[in-house]
Amino acid sequence: MPRTSVKTKDRSSPIQLLTPEGEIVRDSKLSFDPLSADLRALYRDMVMTRRLDTEAIALQRQGELGLWPSLFGQEAAQVGAARALSQADMVFPTYREHGVALCRGLDPAALLGLFRGTTLGGWDPADANFNLYTLVIGAQTLHAVGYAMGVVRDSSRGLENTTSGRPGELPAVLVFLGDGALSEGETNESFIWATTQSLPVVFFCQNNQWAISAPYSVQSTVPVAQRAAGFGLPGVRVDGNDVLACLAATRRALSKARAGGGPTLIEAFTYRRNAHTTADDASRYREHEEEQQWAGRDPIARMHAHLTATGAVGQAFFDEIEDEAKVFAENLRSRCRTLPEPDTSAPFEHTYAEMTSELRHQLGQHQAYLASLHEIAELSGDHA
C-alpha cells in the first residue's frame, strides 16, 4: 500500500497529491484513491512522452524537422489529463500536446509530419477523438466550445453518437491552452459561451509561466484558476508536475461535464523547462536559478521515487521501460526520414468538398510555376 499522510496547505497553493519526494499525500479539496490509477502505466506514459520530445528536438537539430515545440517538464500535466478521458470524449489541443496525442493512440509520426512539412494538418480527428494541432493562440478554445454546443444540440434532437456510453451522460470536451492564451479574446469569449450555456467542456490550462518570453506576471496578478470566478466558472489549481493531481482534477471535471454540470477551468501550475520552440533562446529572458529550481520538481523523477520507495516495482521494470523507449526512438527516427513528400495539388483539392473553378485555375498556375522551376533546375545542371 502507498504511504499517505494529511498535510495542511495554503489555500492558494496548488493541490498536490504526489510530492517531489515521491510521497502520496491527501488534500481535502480533491479526493483521490491511489488504487484507482495504474501508477506504473502513468510512469511509462510520461517516459515515452519525454522520449518523443527528446527525439523530435534531435531531429530538428539535424535538419529533419523545421520546428519543434517542446513539452519538457509538462509530462505529468498532459498524461494525467489524458488518462482521465473516456473514449467518447473529444480533445482540442494546442501545438504542444504530444503526450496527450500518445495517450489517445495517435501515430507519433503524424506529429512529426506536421513539423516536417509533409502533411497539411496531420491526421483525421475522428480516428482518436483528437483534433488537429492549433497554431493560432487561443483559437482552439472556440473550436472546443462550438463542438460542445453541437454535442448538446445533437443530443436534444436524439441523434446518434452523442452519448458517453452511460445513461444520461454526454461526451465531454477537453481543451488545452497555455497561460498566454488567457490574454486572447477567443479564450475569454469561449469562457462566456461555455458558462452561460452550461456546456460539457473542461478548459485545461498548462500554466508553464512563460508565453514565449513574457512571464505570467505581465498578464495577471492572480492565479489562472482564480480568474475563472469572473466568468462564473469553477476553477481549480493543481500542481502541474503531479500526475496524480492532474488526473484526479480532470476526472472530476470531466465527470461533472458529462453529467450536465457545466464547464470547469483547471490550472496545472507547471514549468516549460526547454525554450518555447527550437527557434527560441530561453536564456535571454529566464534565470538559470529558476530553471534549476524546477528541475528538482521533475514529474517523472517523483513517480520513480514513489514506485521505488514503496517497492511497487524493481529495477527490472525501469530497465524494461528504458528498452521500450529506445526501440520507440529508433522507429520514430526511421519513420520521420521516410515520410512521403506531399502532393503539391493537395491544398487546392482539399479546401472545399468540391474544387471551385477559381481554385482549379489557381492549381493550373501553381503547377505551371513548379514546372518552370524544374526547367530552370535542368538548365542549371546542363550548364554545370
Image: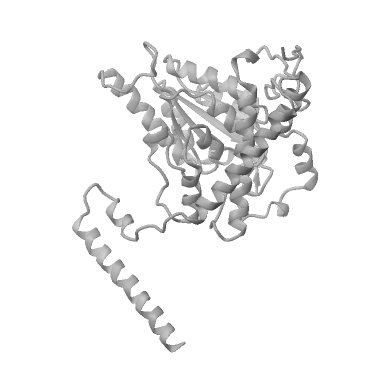
- State the residue at coordinates (56%, 33%): 205
Please indicate, yes or no, whether residue 223 appears anywhere in the rendered image. Answer: no
Colour scheme of the picture: one colour
Farthest bottom residue in view? 383
| Residue 17 left/right relative to 358 | right
- State the residue at coordinates (42%, 36%): 142
The spot of residue 344 in percent (x, y) is 34, 61
Vertical comparison of 90 with 109: above or below: above
Q: How many marks?
A: 0
- State the residue at coordinates (58%, 33%): 78
Farthest left residue in view? 357
Residue 306: quadrant of the picture: top right
Residue 257: quadrant of the picture: top left
Nearer to the camera, 272 or 207: 272
The spot of residue 218 in percent (x, y) is 65, 42
Nearer to the camera, 156 or 221: 156
| Residue 5 left/right relative to 127 | right
Nearer to the camera, 86 or 17: 86
- State the residue at coordinates (69%, 51%): 282
The spot of residue 43 in percent (x, y) is 65, 29
Vertical comparison of 381 with 89: above or below: below
Vertical comparison of 24 with 141: above or below: above
Vertical comparison of 376 with 1: above or below: below
The spot of residue 167 in percent (x, y) is 37, 11
Residue 348: quadrant of the picture: bottom left
In the picture, which quadrant includes the N terminus?
top right
Please indicate, yes or no, whether residue 337 appears anywhere in the rendered image. Answer: yes
| Residue 146 left/right relative to 101 | left
